[in-house]
Image (cartoon, rainbow, N blue to C red):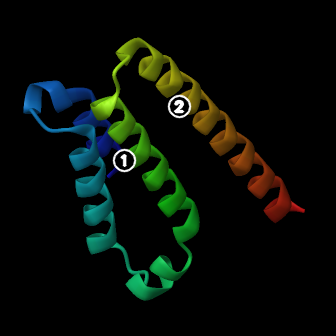
């Protein structure tokens, strides 16, 4: 299963699919073949975190589309993306260590 998703990501330019579509297809396929209860899985999703990142990228996209100074917006985008990745990694590691303790 994982090999198909990775192959989809590698071949997405050839297949003319966006990476988000490949990810959603992989997740949908995994849900379809899994024996886990869908409601149980969805209850463990951290919806506030997903909503935060969705809002962050929607606002950044709006800023990019309406900006008068594209270079400044590009620099802001780089900073926000780097900060988002850093915060995400810190969060994942802290959560891992909290669950391991």
**Circle 1 sits on which residue?**
2
The answer to whether 13 appears left or right of 36 in the picture is left
Residue 32 in percent (x, y) is at 26, 73
**Compared to 1, does 61 lie above or below?**
above
Residue found at the far right of this picture: 101
Mark 2 vs mark 1: in front: 2
The answer to whether 79 appears left or right of 41 in the picture is right
SS assignment at label 2: helix
**Circle 2 sits on which residue?**
81
Question: At x 90% / y 62%, what residue is drawn?
Answer: 101
Other residues around mark 2 within 10 Å, as few (<14) / some (14–19) / many (≥20)? some
**Compared to 38, does 19 lie above or below?**
above
Question: At x 72% / y 49%, what residue is drawn?
Answer: 91
Question: At x 67% / y 34%, what residue is drawn?
Answer: 86
What label does residue 70 carry, if any?
A: none
Residue 78 in percent (x, y) is at 51, 22
Other residues around mark 1 within 10 Å, as few (<14) / some (14–19) / many (≥20)? few
For the question of whether residue 46 can be seen, the reply is: no
Residue found at the far top of this picture: 71
Question: At x 25% / y 63%, what residue is drawn?
Answer: 29
How far is mark 2 from mark 1, CA to CA?
26 Å
Give the total number of marks visible in the rendering. Answer: 2
Residue 38 in percent (x, y) is at 39, 83
**Compared to 14, does 27 lie above or below?**
below
Residue 28 in percent (x, y) is at 27, 64
């Amino acid at each position: 299963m994982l090999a198909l998703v990775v192959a989809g990501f590698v071949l997405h330019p050839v297949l003319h699919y966006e990476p988000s579509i490949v990810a959603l297809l992989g997740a949908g396929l995994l849900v379809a073949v899994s024996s886990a209860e869908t409601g149980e899985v969805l209850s463990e999703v951290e919806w506030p975190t997903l909503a935060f990142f969705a809002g962050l990228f929607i606002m950044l996209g709006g800023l990019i589309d309406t900006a008068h100074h594209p270079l400044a917006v590009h620099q802001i985008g780089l900073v926000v993306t780097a900060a988002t990745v850093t915060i995400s990694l810190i969060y994942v590691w802290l959560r891992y260590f909290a669950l391991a303790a």
